[in-house]
Amino acid sequence: MGRAPCCDKANVKRGPWSPGEDSKLKEHIEKHGTGGNWITLPQKAGLNRCGKSCRLRWLNYLRPNIKHGEFSDEEDRIICTLYTNIGSRWSIIASQLPGRTDNDIKNHWNTKLKKKLMGLLPFEPHHHHHRKSPNQTSSLHQNLPFISNYTPASTISFTSLAPPFHVPSSNYNCTTNTISLPFYQNQESLLVSSSTSSGITPMQQCYPHNNNLHLFGSGSEVSVCSSSDGSYSHVNQEELGFQNYISNNSGFGECNNNNNNTFMLSHRSTNSYGSEFFDEKPNDGCFLQMQTPLDYELEVIKQLISSNSRSNNNNGYFSVDENKTEEKVMYNNYY
DNA sequence: AATCGGTGCAACCGCGTGCCA
DNA sequence: GTGGCACGCGGTTGCACCGAT
């Protein structure tokens, strides 16, 4: 038995939106909100559209603060880094890019970034685990300036099931249960909650402090959040590597980077002998940087591109354990 | 000027998930 | 516990636009 259609597709308008429809929808939502029900919204707004279509139009186009146009090198770098670490979780990636929608990022990746990357390295599927010495520069560094060079750094490592965070030892203090995340520095404030097997904690509003977002958590269950784009998303905290950072510090730790912004996203990899290694480099504070040797990352990206699987690929370090505690990431919703 | 192919983006589709009765 | 409903997400499609021929 199939799913019942969300609307009578034969009797609703489809295809591109007219300016009149746009203004009707915008006006209605600005005046009344979505009412928590997209299905009935079109009728209330006087639109002959499917509720899903209205939702999409609002989220991807009409919403305030939507950014259109060229992606910056920094945005490209964030997308590449996060894609490498979490795969095609566009909504999560979008949460790191204020004003960008998941659809935008997905399109940008599929039409530009993917081709750019695929065109620059020959795909060598049988040589996945070799490493270049750190001082070898990939041609990609020259061709893709948004990807940074690999530079080793001294860090404390917190391993986890998914890409772990590394906290540079010089920037770590065990004082409070606060993490500073430099890449959130443009956020005004965030709403945070975490869901665990025992329920969802009350949402908390977090404000950037010294240009960093502070996440407040307790014990081994702390949430990750982000936003600004007016939507919310589910984030498995292990995917972003927070879980063990917190748990290894008994819930009391601070990545206090002062103004140096060295919080890092790193990448757990396996070498040709099957043992794990961690690649690390300092973060300049604006974004998550590539943590592994670049040529390795790009091969991985190519594998990901080549794979059509959705969050269930088998190459070990990218698969996500969907059974892990899932975090609710609440953004400042518009309505 | 007409045609063709490539590209980019908006919109659609269908599945997974959470919520609620 | 279960089934129905609505939402959100990621993959895919459709089409307008543009440059090359």
Image (cartoon, coloured by chain):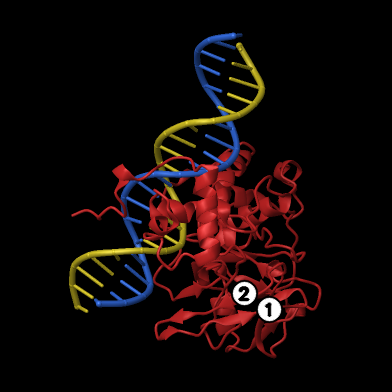
Chain colours: A red, B blue, C yellow
Chain hosting mark 2: A
Query: Which one is in front, A138 or A52?
Result: A52
Expressed as whole percent of the image width and height from the top left, the position of residue A265 reads: 64, 66
| Left or right, residue A149 beside residue A335 | right
Q: Is residue A126 visible?
A: no
Task: Name the residue tied to disc 2.
Answer: A190
Indicate the secondary structure of the residue bearing disc 1: loop
Q: Is residue A106 above or below residue A245?
A: above
Expressed as whole percent of the image width and height from the top left, the position of residue A169 reads: 73, 78
Q: Residue placed farthest to the right in the image?
A: A259
Q: Is residue A132 visible?
A: yes
| Left or right, residue A47 beside residue A156 | left
Q: Is residue A183 above or below residue A62?
A: below
Quarter of the picture holding the N terminus of chain A: bottom left
Expressed as whole percent of the image width and height from the top left, the position of residue A47 reads: 42, 51
The amino acid type, in three-letter code, at marker 1 is Tyr
- Are marks 1 and 2 in one subunit? yes
Residue A196 position by quadrant: bottom left
Q: Is residue A13 above or below residue A218?
A: above
Q: At 68% from the left edge and 84% from the top edge, which residue is drawn?
A: A254
Task: Name the residue tied to disc 1.
Answer: A207
